[in-house]
Amino acid sequence: MQKFNIKIRHIRSLVSPNIRNLRAYNAKEIPCRVKLDANESPYGFEINDKILKSIKTNRYPDPEAKTLKKIIAKNLRLNPENILFGNGSDELIYYLITVFGGPVLYPVPTFSMYGIISQALGEKRIEVPLDDEFDLDTDRILSLIKKEKPGIIFLSSPNNPTGNCFSADRILKIVEFTSSLVTGHLSLVVIDEAYQPFSSEKGFLPMLSDYKNLVILRTLSKIGFAGLRVGFMIADREIINEVNKVRLPFNLNSVSQSVASALIKNTNIIKLHIGLITSERERLLNELWGIKGIKPYPSEANFILFRTKNSDKIYYRLLKKGVLVRNMKGAVNGCLRVTIGTKKENNIFIKTLKEVMK
């Protein structure tokens, strides 16, 4: 059989056009002594032998994650039928865009996966810049809804990477405008509340029954379970049924289900950890305000965005000293983002930042 020398350009010609020019989400590991770049909790949980022994490695996991679903439904006072799990919220974002299609509208800067997944699925992306206060430009958004008729709208509140909650009245205005057939602009509105546990705002769960086009995304990743990859959406039963049509079978593995089901019952410890993080966030915010050349932004999340001159140089100087933060170049130019760590980690960060700012 004759062999052909297949070159890279030949392989690329087989790739779908919308994938060919897509930039992959860069989640590489960078060696450091203090890791404050990924919005993880600094507090984890020990997994005892009893939990591990309960896992049957030769059997497929519960396809509906019924035990975990009941626990979360009880904690949030929800009907289990209104909950659907994903392998992290990313998977659910993928499913939602697959089912409801585009165009996909979202403010910028925000969580990058809305745009990446939209492009991967070949859907038109409508990016609307936030205003000077990092809040929603409601007039612009409503105008684009009328013109573009998006299938789905993503609103991350508290927003990553800015850290603030969008004004509740502005969010509600968008939800109401897209929920009535009278306006002729019906769209699915997804409020991503990944960072809601750290916020002083109540969130939008209480309004779920009032608006059939409203979806809430939550995750366990930010409260100490990032390694389990457990995200979930809360929505009307009809939306859950439609998304279930494309959900891959057994998408939440047995280890994640068993560990999360056992450990999420430790509500007092989880609340304690959240309290420690929010307390450190306020302390860190005050410390940053006291450093010349640093402008921090108020946060309702487990991280703080701050602006500084020569942000690239500051980022690499911190990294050289073993402190890893997130360089927001390309999303919020001139800014870095620091995750709230333990008191010890935060002290090292502040001390090192002062040194590199000299």
Image (spheres, grey):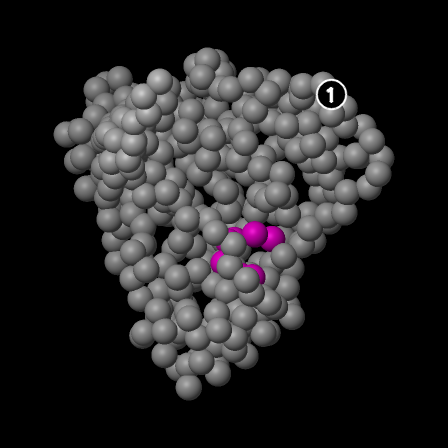
Query: Residue drawn at (42%, 36%), measured in percent from left and top?
Result: 191
Q: Quadrant of the N terminus?
A: top left
Query: Residue drawn at (59%, 44%), measured in percent from left and top?
Result: 226
Secondary structure category for the residue under label 1: loop
Whether residue 316 appears in this view of the structure is: yes
Q: Position of residue 128 (x, y in %)?
A: 23, 44
**Of residues 256 and 223, which is closer to you in this image?**
256
Q: Amino acid at mark 1?
A: Asn
Query: Residue drawn at (49%, 35%), measured in percent from left and top?
Result: 89
Q: Position of residue 126 (x, y in %)?
A: 23, 37
Q: Quadrant of the C terminus?
A: bottom left
Magenta span: 35-41
Report crowding for label 1: few under 14, some 14 to 19, many 20 or more residues within 10 A (C-alpha): few
| Residue extending farthest right | 50
Whether 19 is drawn above or below 132: the answer is above
**Of residues 50 and 173, which is closer to you in this image?**
50
Query: Residue drawn at (73%, 21%), measured in percent from left and top?
Result: 58
Q: Position of residue 14 (x, y in %)?
A: 27, 26
Looking at the image, residue 280 sits to the left or right of residue 184; the answer is: right
Q: Is residue 265 magenta?
A: no
The residue singled out by tag 1 in the image is 58
Looking at the image, residue 152 sits to the left or right of residue 351; the answer is: left
Q: Position of residue 300 (x, y in %)?
A: 48, 54
Whether 229 is drawn above or below 350: the answer is above
Dominant SS type (magenta): loop
For residue 296, which quarter of the picture? bottom left
